[in-house]
Amino acid sequence: MKTITEAMHWRYSTKEFDANKKISAEDFESLKDILRLSPSSTNIQPWHFVIADDDAGKARIAKSTSGMFDFNAPKITDASHVIVFCSRIDADEAFLRDVL
């Protein structure tokens, strides 16, 4: 079994995706469970996820690459699924009241 440090020495940043390969529904459900269960320090989970798994959704997300980051558009449109991580920048009293 590798240590975390050993695992971090081997990492791979995907530069392009095979548009014909798809993550199975079962595997993606497992991934969504992991995302939902991710803890935060105060257990308020101040985030949500936007998931695109179809061409229209991925195209909408790819619009964010226009301009200087056009080269990233195929990474979004060719990926099986795209997850956008969205986080609150503050947790005011009203938000905490709603959560609790």
Image (cartoon, grey):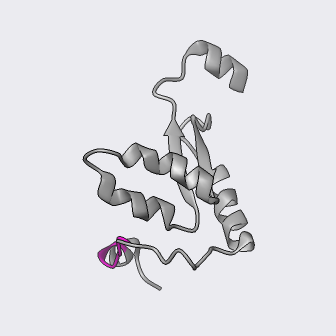
Magenta-drawn stretch contains 76: no
Q: Position of residue 60 (x, y in %)?
A: 53, 46
Q: Position of residue 22 (x, y in %)?
A: 62, 75
For image coordinates 63% across by 13% down, the residue present is 94
Q: Is residue 69 left or right of residue 30?
A: left
For image coordinates 51% across by 36% down, the residue present is 87
Q: Position of residue 11 (x, y in %)?
A: 35, 75
- Image: 24 above or below 94: below
Q: Is residue 34 left or right of residue 11?
A: right
Q: Position of residue 74 (x, y in %)?
A: 41, 63
- Residue 83: quadrant of the picture: bottom right
* Prevailing secondary structure of the magenta residues: loop
26 or 78, which is in the foreground? 78
Q: Is residue 19 left or right of residue 94?
A: left
Magenta-drawn stretch contains 9: yes
For image coordinates 52% across by 39% down, the residue present is 86
- Image: 18 above or below 56: below
For image coordinates 60% across by 38% down, the residue present is 45
58 or 47, which is in the foreground? 58
Q: Is residue 74 visible?
A: yes
- Bounds of the magenta span? 8-14
Q: Is residue 38 visible?
A: no
- Image: 73 above or below 21: above
Q: Quadrant of the C terminus?
A: top right
